[in-house]
Image: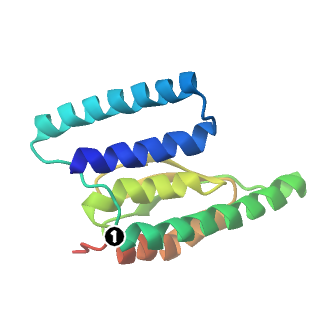
Amino acid sequence: MHIVKWAVVLSIFWLLLSGFIEPLLLSFGVISVVIVLFILKRMDRAENEPGQIGTSIRLIRYTPWLIGQVFSSAIHVTKLIWGSPDKVSPAIAKINVKDVPASSRVLYANSITLTPGTLSVDLDENEVTVHALHRSSIEELQEGQMEKKITGIWGENK
């Protein structure tokens, strides 16, 4: 059942990205999905624990929130770039992630990177190093809104 879920998700994802329904391109899609499923099956055997696909309500709650974050950050970055150059104040800071469950820390770091104007540079045990175009982005992360959202959705805290 695990492989069937991944086959469906990967096939739909491939169709959405390609947008073509021609025999040659569909065959390339099938081949690419089969290769990924083969690698996934080998990885499952290596770790003896199949990875779970996020088909739960958590993914449904997380995706719209992240898309909203991406759009609001994009507007912020656009204003910075179109405004005067002295409004850009690049900053690097370490953000504490000890309250984020270990299983969600990579998701947290990637969520930071997906929001325009911020980039996760490094992820250690209890902190993520973040580069931002403007100091206010670092301050927002330090306030913990994104951390609380990820911890609230993906749970397993403490």
* Residue 9 visible in the shown view: yes
Colour approach in the figure = rainbow
- Nearest the camera: 47 or 76? 47
Percent position of residue 83, x then y: 89, 58
82 relative to 39 in the view: left or right: right
Q: In which quarter of the image is residue 30?
A: top left
Farthest-out residue, top: 24
Percent position of residue 44, x then y: 17, 39
29 relative to 7 in the view: left or right: right
Residue at x 73% of width, y 56% of height: 89
Alpha-carbon neighbours of circle 1 within 10 Å: few (<14), some, or many (≥20)? some
Give the residue number, with chain letter if any, for mark 1. Answer: 154
Question: Looking at the figure, which quarter contains the C terminus?
Answer: bottom left
Farthest-out residue, front: 23
Q: How many labels does the image show?
A: 1
Circle 1 SS class: helix
Residue at x 31% of width, y 71% of height: 99
Percent position of residue 18, x then y: 60, 36
82 relative to 26 in the view: left or right: right
Image position of 116 with respect to 139: above or below: above
* Residue 93 visible in the shown view: no
Residue at x 39% of width, y 33% of height: 33
Residue at x 63% of width, y 61% of height: 70
Residue type at the position of mark 1:
Trp
Image position of 53 with respect to 38: above or below: below
Q: In which quarter of the image is residue 151?
A: bottom left
Percent position of residue 113, x then y: 54, 51
